[in-house]
Amino acid sequence: RGRPERPASSRSLAMEAHGPWLPITSPRTLRACKDFGTRPTDVFVCSYPKSGTTWTQNVLAQIITALETTATFAHVSDVSPFFEIDPHWTH
């Protein structure tokens, strides 16, 4: 005589399907991230979703390029890619 089972929430279904990762992340990409070789001069932006990540990436891109007016890119992901997103890797 236990409690009736509650329907699974969309969040728990997502966790079941993808773990704590976004559905745009694959095990292959996670392995590529793990094996990625870093340099002492690399800078990582680590933030919560919807907390100003793109703005921070743009500020850092300007600082790193010393505000070069010739440094152009279509999107900040061209110079500061999201590691956990599959399309940013050429496996």
Image: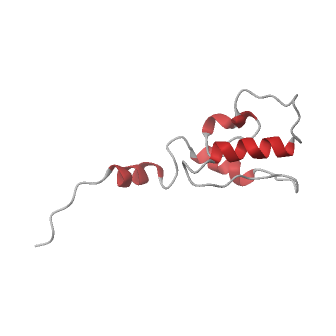
Single out the residue that lies furthest toward the bottom. 1
Work out whether residue 21 can be spotted: yes
Instruction: Give the tally of numbered discs.
Output: 0
- The relative height of residue 59 versus residue 71 in the rendered view (above or below) is below
66 or 88, which is in the foreground? 66
The residue sitting at 83% across, 52% down in the picture is 42
Q: Can residue 90 be seen in this view?
A: no
Q: Taking 59 as reference, is 68 left or right?
A: right
Q: Which residue is drawn at 85% across and 45% down?
A: 64
Q: In which quarter of the image is residue 77?
A: top right
Which color mode does the image show? secondary structure
Which residue occupies 70% across, 52% down? Answer: 45
- Give x and y (percent) for residue 38: 82, 53
Q: For residue 68, what is the image quadrant?
A: top right
Residue drawn at x 48%, y 54% as measured from the top left = 19
Q: Where is residue 75 in the image (x, y as percent from the top left)?
A: 69, 31
Quarter of the figure with the N terminus: bottom left
Q: What residue occupies the far left of the structure in this picture?
A: 1
Question: Residue 61 vs residue 2: left or right?
Answer: right
Image quadrant occupied by the C terminus: top right
- Asked where in the image residue 71 lies, by quadrant, the reply is top right
**Residue 34 x, y percent position in the rendering:** 70, 54
Location of residue 74 with respect to 5 vertically, above or below? above
Left or right of residue 28, residue 78 in this image: right
Whether 22 is drawn above or below 5: the answer is above
